[in-house]
Structure formats: C-alpha cells, structure tokens
Image (cartoon, rainbow, N blue to C red):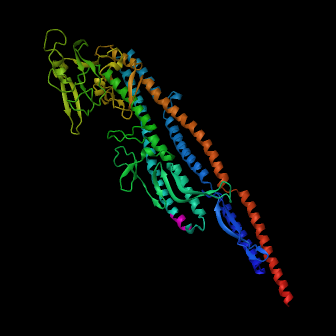
Amino acid sequence: MSSIFNTLNIGYSGLSAAQVGVTTTSHNITNAESDGYTRQRVVTAAATPIYSAAGNVGNGTQIMDISRIFDNFVYDRYTGISSDKEYSDFTKGTLEELSTYFPEIDDVGIKSDLKEYYNMWQTFSDNPDNDAMKVALAKQTETLSATITATQNKIVNLQESINEQLSVNVKEVNALAEELAGVNKSIEIAEAGDAYTANDLRDKRSSIELRLAKLIGAESHIEQITSNSAIDSSSNEGYGSYTLSVNGFNIVDGGSFHPIHISSDNNPNGFYELSYERQDGVLISMDESIQGGRIGAILDLRGDKRLDDNSGVPSNGVLQQVIDQMDAFANTLIESTNNLYAATSTTKMESNALTLNNTQSLVNSSLNIKKGSFDVVMYDIDGNVTARRTINIDSATSMSGAAGSNSIEGQLSAQGDDNSDGNANNDIDDFLQFNWATYLDGENAVEFIMDPAYAAKGYAFAIEDNLTDGNFSTGSNFAGALGLNRFFDGSNAKDIDLSFKLKENTTDISAGKSTVTGDNSLAMDMIQQQFEVYDFNVGNAVYKSTVYGMFDVIATEVGVTTNQAILNNQTISAQFNATELEYSSISKVSIDEELTNLIKYQTAYGAASKIITTVDQMMQTLLGIKQ
C-alpha cells in the first residue's frame, strides 16, 4: 500500500529524472558544434503503480532511455547528396585548373604561337635565302614546340597529381572502414540485451559513414529501421545486421573489414589500380565500379579503363581524352610537316627509331602509312631534276626485299630508266643506297644515302608524296610517318621540337625543294598546310579538321566541359544545402531549444525538491504528535 515513504521515493524519482534531463541537455549544449553529433532526449514514463484498495496509486517516474533524434531516411539522402557534391566539387576544381592551361581567349598560348609560326613561313617565303629569316623561323618553331610541350606536361602532371591523391584517399577509406568495423563491435557490446542505445557510438558511426560517402560514395545498409515517434515524429533508428558497400562491394560487414587493394606495380605509367579481395582470395578489379565521391571523380577524370596494349594508359577519362587529343594534334602537325619537308633536297635521310621489322607490311603496321605512292627525285648541282622514280605502296609493301620486289628496297634498287635518256648508269638505283639497321635495344631504322661519288658532284635527292586529289592528306605519308629529313623531332605533344639537325645549324633550313637561289616552293607548301584538312585519330574517333580547327576542338571541349561542371555544381550545391538544412533541423542541436529545456528541467527539479520538503514537514508533524 501507499505510504509516506513511497511519496518520498516519488519525489526522489522526479529529482533523478530532472537531473538526468539537465545532464543530457548540458551534453547537447556542449556538443552543439561537435562534428556528427545528434541531439539527445530523455525518455521517461510513469513507474509501475502500487495497487491498493483505493485503486492504483502513482509511483513516480522512471527513465526508459536516452535517445538521439535521428532519421535514417533523411540521413541516407544527406550522405548520398554529400557524395555527389564531393564528386562535383572535385571535378569542378580540377577542370577549372585544366581550363587555365588553354588561355586562348586572351590571344596567348598555342594557337597564337601557331599563327606566328605560319606567319614566319610566309615571311621566309618572301626571303628564301635570308639567313636571319631562317633563325627567326627556327626560334618561332622552338617557341611553338615549347608551348605545346609545356601545356601537355601540365595536363599530364595534373593527371599524375590526382593519381597520387587516389592512393592517399583509398588509404583513408581503408582506415575509416577499419575504424567503422571497430565501432560496430563496440555498439554491439554496448547495446547487448537491448537495454540501452549507444548514442555517442552511433553518432561516431554516422560521422564515419558520411566521410566514406564523400570519399568513395559508400552506402550503409541496416537490417531493420524502427520508428521512435514518441521522441520525435521523424525519428527512427536502425538495428540488426550492418553492411557498408561501394556499388555492391561490401567493405564492412558488421565488425568485419575488407580493405580495398591498391597497387601500381603492374602499370608502367604508375597509375593505381583498385581491386576487391573475395573470400577465396581472388582479386576483382573495382576501378570501374566506383562512381561516387572524390575517388569516383578522380577515376572519371584520370580514366579507369585500360587499353588492350601494355602501355598502362587509360582509354577513357576527361584528362586522358585531352592528352590524347593534344598528342593527335601534335603528331599530325609533326608528320604532315615532315612529309612536306622531305621534299627538300639532301644527301642523306635517316628515319626515326622504328618498332616494325623490315619484312612487315607498312600499311598494316603502327605507322601512319597509307596506300599510295611517292616520288624519289634527283637534283643536280644546278637544281635541275635529273631523275624521278615512283615508289608504290600497297597492303603487301614492306621495307626490305630483293631488287624488283614490292618492297621499298626492291623498288629503289630495281634497274630502270628514270630520265628516259637510255643510260642505265644515271638512274635512282645508281644514285641511292638503302640501308636497314637494327640497334642493340631492338629498335630499327632505315636510311637513304646518296652515293658519295654523286654527292661529291653536287647531286641531292628528295621525296615528294603523290596526292590523289591535290589535298595534302591524300598521299602515302611515307616520309612523314618515318621522319625522313624531318623538320620536327618527336611524335607527340610531350616531345615535339625542332629537329636536332636544324637546331645545330639553323641556316640549313630550306625554303625550296631544290638548291636554286630564290626557290620558295617548299615554304609555299608550308603556308598552305594550315588550310589543309587532315585526319586526327583520337582513340576510335577521327576528327577531320585543319591544324587550327583541331586545336579549337580541344580548347572548346575543355571550355564546354568545365562550364558544364560549374553549372552541375551549382545545381548539386543547391540540392545539398536543402538536404543539409533538413537533416540539421532534425538532428542538430538548437541552443535556444536546449536553453528552454534547461529551464524546464531546472523547474522540474525544484518542484520535485518541493515534494521532498513537503514529505519532510509531514514526517516532522507525525513525530511532533507522538511527542
């Protein structure tokens, strides 16, 4: 039955509940700015009543739980949009950096240097024998080459930089995932028996989940979501089995952690590759499976698909696409220029280092040699054409072969009357020597050398491509692909440069095809080159454009892609702000609200104290009656 002592206990329960309320509110206030903290509320209920003849007599209050105000569904949206925003922020920042490498809007950069380069050819054509013009052309060529190389190196360095960031971020993901597995174990121990909710541990878990979502787009999955509307209409909590996955790859299973493997050992370019270890120990590539967070942005920018060759270069990726386009731009400029410059007469032509063998089909090799033909032209000391022979290239043509065969050597060494004078001793086969060399590193080269006796008499030779319809791109590109008598050294945007031979002596630069004074025929072809349409091969895509046009394509795509990233970032930022506000309104601490609660609990504590004071006075009265 109810007694005065029971009433004292009721007062004590009120004091205890108010004290816990003050403590919890204080905890909220002091952690208002703590990262990942969610506000907590004291859950109280009437204690089990005492049964008496008068009925059920109240027995005070009891603390059922201290719960956090948390909505799993809102939090899932928040982590999802956080992943998208991190992806968007990183992409935007990287592309804005990339766009600064193409300052064409300010009339500086590659296009400006390219215009000046062709202007120098124009000036040179007007003064073909002026050595000062040759020096000026050489310097402008070096300036253009240096600008192209510097721009490409910046892009490559940017790609390498984010590749290194990939390693750093994956290591952070593994560290966080391992920590998360440990937190899961602690939560399981703390909540054993379903007596209490480990609020602060759950906050820590949510904080780690958010960081993992931002890093790699990880998503958490909990077996059961339980509503807690008695605390807050939008409050619910997850219980049961727990997993954290990245597009189907579970990196955390409850208290177990499965690290992401990262290695660059098998990539010659040092690009990191990510893999997931199955239970049987087999590693599964997961580069293409990561689509969210900062790591997803890194992979999409750097590239996450490998080419079928052993180069280790990605076949996709925004930065890799620009690198490939720049290489195609530079390679076509190099080859087309060299193909034209081979028409200037000389006594020796030596190719670049070649990876093909001397019996391999030229058309089916990695060299950009097409079916067609070219002429070997012989000049005397006065610049007169003394012999001309057409060399045909079809799908079976190789470099070496017996005289009279379909090979380049065979066609050059075949006896013929190349000047229609009936003399068999003054033809191309008498003037030229064909040499095939294999170096110690396994690479090969070919050279065409004027017979020393004829060279001493002032004879020289040249290679002129035969064009099927007058367009520069319709020739065989034999001399350009091999780099014979080249004007440019290199093969791509990283190594393009004025040829070493012409750097040593810029006065060797020729404006004409022959040695005749005033000949500017070659310079005129170089001027025309800027208006010619070529095929620029970028992966499986082919851009048909002029040299200027191809560079405009590169700069424009960079600008458009950057602008799209900026606009997309604005949209995602707006969505993020709205979702963050919704999440904060549910789970974050409001200082004003907590101060109100503090006053409420303070008042409750005072009221409970009054109960105890009243009981004390009642007991004093009883004791006084006895006396």
Q: Position of residue 206 (x, y in %)?
A: 57, 56
Instruction: Judge left or right: residue 72 versus residue 600.
Output: left
Q: Position of residue 311 (x, y in %)?
A: 33, 40
Q: From what the image shows, is residue 321 above or below residue 178?
A: above
The residue drawn where x is 35% and y is 23% is: 337
Q: Nearer the viewer, residue 359 or 488?
A: 359
**What secondary structure is the stretch in magenta mostly built from?**
helix
Q: In which quarter of the image is the N terminus?
A: bottom right
- Highlighted range, magenta: 185-190
In the rendered image, residue 551 lying in the magenta stretch gets the answer: no
The residue drawn where x is 36% and y is 22% is: 134
The residue drawn where x is 26% and y is 34% is: 355
Instruction: Judge left or right: residue 439 versus residue 302.
Output: left
The residue drawn where x is 51% and y is 27% is: 107
Q: From what the image shows, is residue 382 above or below residue 489?
A: above
> Quadrant of the rendered structure where residue 607 is?
bottom right
Q: Residue furthest top?
A: 421
